[in-house]
């Protein structure tokens, strides 16, 4: 399982390398998954899964995506706080 810090470093590197469309797609996917979403369909199926979350992040809690989004500055502070307070993660 990847750590939030590993993913933050990965996306910071992607941004530095000016990988625009891939970077923006990942940003949207993480923002969606931080709110409990599935990150959208990937256009193929693997092990019965078709979404970003189902294929790449099975078992990762919403808090993982929230931490990456916060570390990347992808969510405003008030949005991050609201996500933590109303996360769909089991307690």
Image: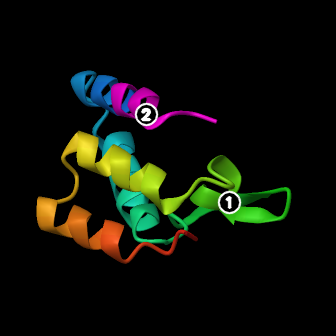
Q: Position of residue 75 (x, y in %)?
A: 21, 58
The residue under the point 58% across, 71% down is: 90
Q: Position of residue 46 (x, y in %)?
A: 80, 54
The residue under the point 41% across, 66% down is: 32
Could you give the CA–CA distance between mark 2 and mark 1, rounded to whole angstroms? 17 Å
The residue under the point 49% across, 72% down is: 37
Asked which quadrant contains residue 53, the reply is bottom right
Q: Position of residue 19 (x, y in %)?
A: 31, 32
User: Residue 47 versus residue 45: which sits nearer the camera?
Assistant: 47
Q: Earlier in the sequence, mark 2 or mark 1?
A: 2
Callout 2 secondary element:
helix
- Vertical arrangement, residue 6 with respect to residue 22, above or below: above
Which mark, residue 71? none
Name the quarter where the N terminus is drawn.
top right
Which mark, residue 7? 2
- Farthest residue to the right: give it: 47
Asked which quadrant contains residue 82, the reply is bottom left
Please state if 49 lies on the left or on the right of 85 as rendered: right
Callout 1 secondary element:
helix
Say few, some or many: other residues with alpha carbon within 10 Å of mark 1 (under 14 / 14 to 19 / 20 or more): many
Identify the residue under disc 1.
54
- Vertical arrangement, residue 58 with respect to residue 33, above or below: above
Judge whether residue 12 is colored magenta.
Answer: no
Please state if 86 lies on the left or on the right of 60 as rendered: left
Could you tell me if the residues under marks 2 and 1 are in contact, i.e. CB atoms within 8 Å? Answer: no
Please state if 85 lies on the left or on the right of 29 as rendered: left
- Extent of the magenta region: 1-9
The residue under the point 26% across, 30% down is: 15
User: Residue 17 versus residue 34: which sits nearer the camera?
Assistant: 34
User: Residue 23 versus residue 11: which sits nearer the camera?
Assistant: 11
Please state if 71 lies on the left or on the right of 48 as rendered: left
């Amino acid at each position: 399982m990847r750590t939030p810090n590993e993913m933050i470093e990965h996306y910071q590197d992607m941004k530095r390398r000016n990988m625009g469309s891939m970077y923006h797609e990942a940003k949207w996917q993480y923002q969606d998954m931080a709110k409990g979403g599935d990150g959208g369909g990937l256009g193929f199926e693997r092990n019965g899964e078709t979404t970003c979350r189902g294929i790449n992040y099975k078992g990762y809690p919403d808090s993982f995506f929230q931490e990456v989004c916060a570390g990347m500055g992808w969510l405003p502070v008030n949005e991050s706080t609201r996500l933590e307070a109303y996360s769909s993660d089991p307690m």
